[in-house]
Amino acid sequence: MSTATVLSRASAGLQAPEVRVEVHLSPGLPGFTIVGLPESTVREARERVRSALITSYFEWPDHRITVSLAPAEIRKGGGRFDLPIALGLLTASGQLTPQATANRECYGELGLDGSLRPTAGMLAAVQAATAQQRVCALPATGANTLAQLPGSRLIAAPDLLTLCAELKSKTPAVLSGSSLPDQSGSYPDFCDIQGQVAAKRALEIAASGGHHLLMTGPPGAGKTLLASAMPSILPTCTPQALLEQWLIRDVLGLEPTWCRPFRAPHHSATGAALIGGGANAHPGEVSLAHQGILFLDELPEFSPRVLDLLRQPMEQGTVTIARARGANTYPARFQLIAAMNPCPCGNAGQQEPPCRCSSELVSRYQNRVSGPLMDRIDIHIGLERQQTAALLTHQAQGEHSAAIKARVASSWQRQWDRQGCLNAHLDARALLLHCSLETPVRQWFEDACDRLQLSARSVHRTLKVARTLADLAEAAVVGENHLLEGLSYRPRPHDK
Ligand SMILES: [Zn+2]
């Protein structure tokens, strides 16, 4: 036989389009050509495959070799096609039977000594292959993790020679996927945070409705601790959510974490690091925080241009990164918890030590965060520095995170049953449908909004938070007390 076809998959963000690796041996001057839009890493496959075949005691076919990666319009990069090319060559030259690779998909980079190495983005390929009920042949490294994908069937080997023996065997050793592991993850517990009752209440509301939140307060007020405790009150992830996080991490070659993500990028982060980018349009922090918390400390220290990039994912829950090699879309349904000082020195609003910033400096500092971004944050709270005396005296312990988490979970359930999403993600029409007010309350709210000169967007944000407050209180209808508390979380005029 002088032709062979082996199935594999390319990597395009979270997608893994099928690629047919066709190998043709023809008489003529020995040579090696790869066609089908390969990048340079794939063109280098010739050297790796040749050495790997020879060091694995196979014969390098002394023919004119043509390798075609079809369909031609998909770009192919990375070393993942080494293995299917090697298996195609072995099949075409009669060193392996066609049955060995029939209805199987192969991915993996070859070392010069014939060893098999994993490449990033293999989970998306295994997931697509599993959906088509195919067995995957791949490197042993990382295979045990991939085998946690429900329904997957894998033939894994450390090197080419062992893999070929498995593929030829009538009863190959197949790793079978069972179910995703239990969730782990350790976060600070709310009961360990002294005082800050109002802030804890605001975080509970934010968690209940999926609202973005901004804390303003002096250094030492405990902003970072409060934010890092936030995942401990979020409901347990669904298997679907865990799978989405795993897919995103796998594109970057990271291990899965099996818990709500908490991402805290430094304020020097670039747009590409935060949103995603690079030559291959990789996901960024907003996608790594998908289904979890994105914590931006020192918000005004971030570049305003970088912060403006947050607007699309905050609104849509996805981010699209366009590059010359094509656009990738990643999920980015994160919850933003931001923190900032009230002024450059951090002491504005405190009695001791006094603030020494000029009013011009303070407003320039606060204006670094654009109005449109501020507008997209539902809950704004101010924190005060904890009094030393309060920290030293033994206070009655606050509520444990587990108890708050139970309330948040039942609030989520109410929202999902009613409208199929969290309150923060309601569009304007759905909001009016699910948050209708009784006439006197409506009249009162209209007056209040007029007096406070709230923008249309602010009115909607307040309604959403009020809806969450009603859900937390297990109330069917939004009342005046919910709206009043919702209004208290709007930014005060001098905050902006
Ligand atoms: Zn100051």
Image: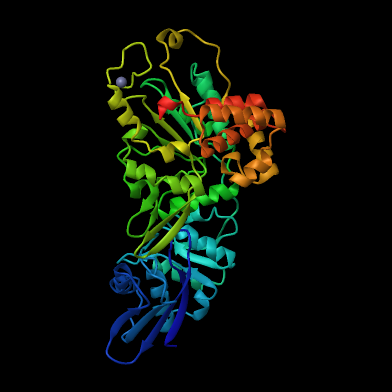
Residue at the location (37% across, 86% down)? 25
Q: Quadrant of the C terminus?
A: top left
Figure quadrant of residue 77 = bottom left
Which quarter holds ligand 1? Answer: top left
Residue at the location (52% across, 27% down)? 452
Decide if residue 363 is on the left or right side of residue 229. Answer: left
Display coloring? rainbow
Residue at the location (43% across, 85% down)? 3
> Which percent across, then down, holds residue 9?
46, 68
In the depicted structure, whether residue 360 falls above or below residue 159: above
> Which percent across, then down, holds residue 419?
67, 45
Q: Nearer the viewer, residue 419 or 192?
A: 419
Residue at the location (28% across, 84% down)? 31
Q: Quadrant of the N terminus?
A: bottom left
Decide if residue 318 is on the left or right side of residue 176. Answer: left
Q: Nearer the viewer, residue 51 or 275?
A: 275
> Which percent across, then down, holds residue 103?
55, 73
Q: Nearer the viewer, residue 401 or 433?
A: 433
Quick one: which residue is furthest to the bottom in this view?
27
> Which percent across, then down, holds residue 477?
71, 32
